[in-house]
């Protein structure tokens, strides 16, 4: 998946990210590794959407074509942290799906 990313040396470049890539701000990465991702924000690159998780209760979803990654975001490569963040993302998205299934958006 090709995503725009601001970088320090040039205004914007395009980088290819594998679907499912998790990005974390470089300033939060050490803290997340130490705390197994229990705090902090992260972004998951999807096939058609980018999912940004902030804290435990805020999700931002946008089209991949509308998303520009920050120059400070780094790809998470720690297997345990990836596993934990995927579970956290699935729970958050599962809560949204449950709200929909309970008829919150029905007339």
Image (cartoon, rainbow, N blue to C red):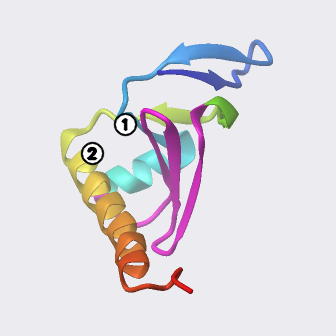
> Which badge, 2 or 1, comes first in the chain's sequence?
1
Label 1 element class:
loop
Identify which residue, 104 or 95, lies in the foreground: 104
Figure quadrant of the C terminus: bottom right
Q: Residue at left 62%, top 14%?
A: 14
Q: Residue at left 49%, top 85%?
A: 104
Label number found at residue 60:
none
Q: Residue at left 43%, top 66%?
A: 39
Residue 105 is left or right of residue 18, and the answer is right
Label 2 element class:
helix
Span colored in magenta? 35-64
Q: Residue at left 32%, top 54%?
A: 85
Residue 35 appearing in the image: no
Q: For residue 36, which quarter of the picture?
A: bottom left
Label number found at residue 76:
1
Residue 47 is left or right of residue 82, and the answer is right
The residue labelled by disc 2 is: 82
Where residue 99 appears, x then y in whole percent?
A: 42, 80
Where residue 62 appears, x then y in whole percent?
A: 61, 46
Q: Is the residue under label 1 in contact with that under label 2 (CB below 8 Å)?
A: yes
Identify which residue, 58 or 100, lies in the foreground: 100
Residue 98 is left or right of residue 56, and the answer is left
Magenta stretch: residue 59 in it? yes
């Amino acid at each position: 998946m090709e995503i725009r990313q601001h970088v320090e040396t040039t205004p914007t470049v395009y980088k290819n990210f594998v679907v499912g890539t998790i990005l974390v701000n470089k300033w939060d990465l050490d803290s997340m590794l130490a705390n197994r991702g229990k705090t902090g924000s992260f972004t998951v690159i999807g096939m058609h959407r980018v999912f940004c998780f902030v804290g435990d209760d805020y999700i931002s979803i946008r089209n991949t074509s509308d998303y520009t990654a920050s120059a400070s975001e780094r790809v998470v490569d720690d297997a345990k942290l990836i596993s934990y963040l995927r579970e956290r993302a699935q729970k958050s998205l599962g809560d949204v799906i449950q709200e929909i299934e309970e008829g919150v958006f029905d007339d």
